[in-house]
Image (tube, helix red, strand yellow):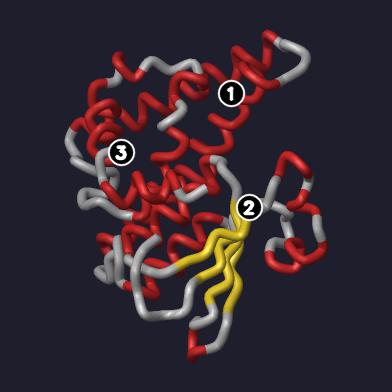
Amino acid sequence: MASSTGKPIDVHTWSTPNGWKIPIMLEECGLPYRIVPVNIGKGEQMAPDFLALSPNNKIPAIVDPEGPGGQPISVFESGAILQYLGRKTGCLYPADERARVSVDEWLFWQVGGFGPMLGQAHHFRIYATEKIPYAIERFSKEAERLYGVLDRRLADHEYLAGAYSIADIAVLPWAKFHEKQGIDAARLPNVKRWLDAVLARPAVQRGLAAI
């Protein structure tokens, strides 16, 4: 857990790609936090107390006791949480508008496509009780296309938006499971280089180990 003299942020989460984003960000920014497990395998995301924080019944959600004006605030949706923490700390979310637009483009690319489509590929390939060839083919092909977009971007950018940012934190936990999505990272040299670099960061390792 990151060290700081501030009050810890409660992170309501579970060990999923979206769930890992927030501990990684908090570790990178050096903010204190406390993991509040929400066991989605047991349906705890449907509990009224969690619904009050996350109306969509999805993890993660946070409660920051030192929000705007020094008052508590709760935030749901992983992309919104990353942006909030970036604005709060000035960490990994640039103030320059042109640079911020680039970060936001790739953040929304992840939350709008890379995550949902890879989640479907993962589900129909691994977890679906009925193997549906059409669904497997559809989402596997879309996963392959999205990884192609990622590899092309990383061909001439060290990180997604140039400098390491919340966009990389958003993409990483999904890309980490590329094999389960039917993707061979060895065929994507730029993705492989980026994955190795980001996974080697101590804060990323601590964040992944937090839940």
Q: CA distance from mark 2 to mark 3?
A: 22 Å
Query: Residue 168 placed where, x, y %?
Result: 34, 46
Separation of residues labelled 1 and 3 (CA atoms): 23 Å
- Vertical arrangement, residue 122 with respect to residue 204, above or below: above
Question: SS for tag 3?
Answer: helix
Numbered disc 2: secondary structure: loop
User: Which residue ends up furthest to the bottom in the rendered image?
Assistant: 69
> Is 44 left, or right, of 167 in this rendering?
right
- The nearer-to-camera label among 1 and 3 is 3
Q: Position of residue 169 (x, y in %)?
A: 38, 48
From the viewer's perspective, is residue 15 above or below residue 81?
above
Dots 1 and 2: beta carbons under 8 Å? no
**Residue at (49%, 47%) from the top-left corner?**
20
Identify which residue is drawn at 30% across, 71% down.
90
Earlier-in-chain disc, 1 versus 3: 1
Q: Which residue is mark 2?
A: 59
**Other-residue count near label 3 (Cα within 10 Å), few / some / many at <14 / 14–19 / ≥20:** some
> Which of the marked residues, 1 or 2, is nearer the chain's N terminus?
2
User: Measured from the top left, where is residue 173 in percent x and y?
Assistant: 44, 39
Residue 121: image tag: 1
Question: Residue visible at 36% across and 59% down?
Answer: 27
Q: In the image, is residue 177 above or below residue 64?
A: above
Residue 195, located in which quarter of the rendered image? top left
Number of the label disc, if any, that sits on residue 199: 3
Q: The residue tagged with tag 1: helix, strand or loop?
A: helix
Give the side of residue 3 with respect to residue 183, left or right: left
> Pointer 1 and pointer 3: residues touching (CB < 8 Å)?
no
Q: Is residue 11 left or right of residue 198?
A: right
